[in-house]
Image (tube, helix red, strand yellow):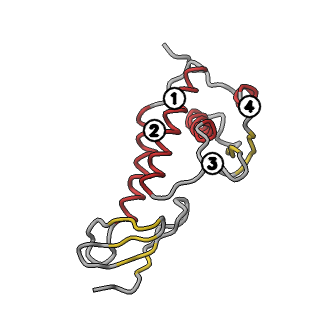
Amino acid sequence: MPKTNLPSLKAIIADFPDITFVEDDEFYWSALTQTVYYDANEVSSTSGTYRLLHELGHALCQHQSYGSGVQLLKLETQAWSKAQEVAKQYDICIDENQIESCLDSYRDWLHLRSTCPTCQAIAVENTPDQYHCFNCFQKWKVPKDQRRRHYRLKLVRST
C-alpha cells in the first residue's frame, strides 16, 4: 500500500540536482531556461506535488517545443508517464483521475482550436497557429500558447 506522506520540495530538489527549480505563481517547465517553476503555495498539497512531478517529467524527458496541438498532447502524456515513474521512487501513486482531468483540459483546448468558427466542423491544423476547414474552406488563426485565452481569428475565406 503506497504511503500517504508526500515527499517534500526539499527532498525532490535534492534528488534531482541537475534540474533547476524556481518559485513562481504557477507550475510549468521552461525549455528555454531549463527550469521547473512551481507555486510555493500549492507545492506541499497532494495536487501540487503531482503537478511538480509532472513538470519534472517534462524536464527529465528533455521536452523542448511542439509543432502542433497533437504534439503538445503527446508531450503532456509523456510527462505524466514520467511523473508516475518518479512518484514510485517516493512510494506514491499519482491519481489516474487527476492525470486524465489534466489531459482532458488539453483535449478540450485542442477541440476548441480545431472547431471551425463558421460551420463548427472539425478542421485540420496547417501550422501551430492556423487551421483550415475542408467543409466550408474557412481559415483561422489561434494563439500558439495553450495558457493564453482561447480565440479563433477568421482569415479571408478562400473559395
Distance from label 3 to label 1 (Cα)? Answer: 17 Å
| N-terminal label among 3 and 1 | 3
Where is residue 137? Give x, y as percent: 29, 78
| Residue under numbered circle 2 | 99
The residue that mark 4 highlights is: 13
Residue type at the position of mark 1: Gln
Q: CA distance from mark 4 to mark 1?
A: 17 Å
Q: Which residue appears at 26% of the width and 69% of the height?
A: 121
Contact between marks 2 and 3 (CB within 8 A): the answer is no
How far apart are the two marked residues, 3 and 4, measured between alpha carbons? 15 Å
The residue that disc 1 covers is 84
Q: Secondary structure at mark 2?
A: helix
Of residues 85 and 130, the one drawn nearer to the viewer in this rendering: 130
Say whether disc 2 or disc 4 marks the residue closer to the N-terminus.
Answer: 4
Q: Which of the two discs, 2 and 1, labels the residue nearer the N terminus?
A: 1
What is the C-alpha distance between the residues marked 2 and 4?
22 Å
Question: Which residue lies under the disc numbered 3?
Answer: 28
Secondary structure of the residue carrying numbered label 1: helix
Distance, label 2 to label 1, CA atoms, is 10 Å
Query: Does the residue at mark 4 contact the one at mark 1 (Cβ under 8 Å)?
Result: no
Distance from disc 2 to disc 3, alpha carbons, whole Å, reads: 15 Å
Tell me if residue 123 comes above or below residue 51 in the rendering: below
Mark number displayed over residue 131: none
Residue 55 falls in which quadrant of the image?
top right
Q: Amino acid at mark 4?
A: Ile
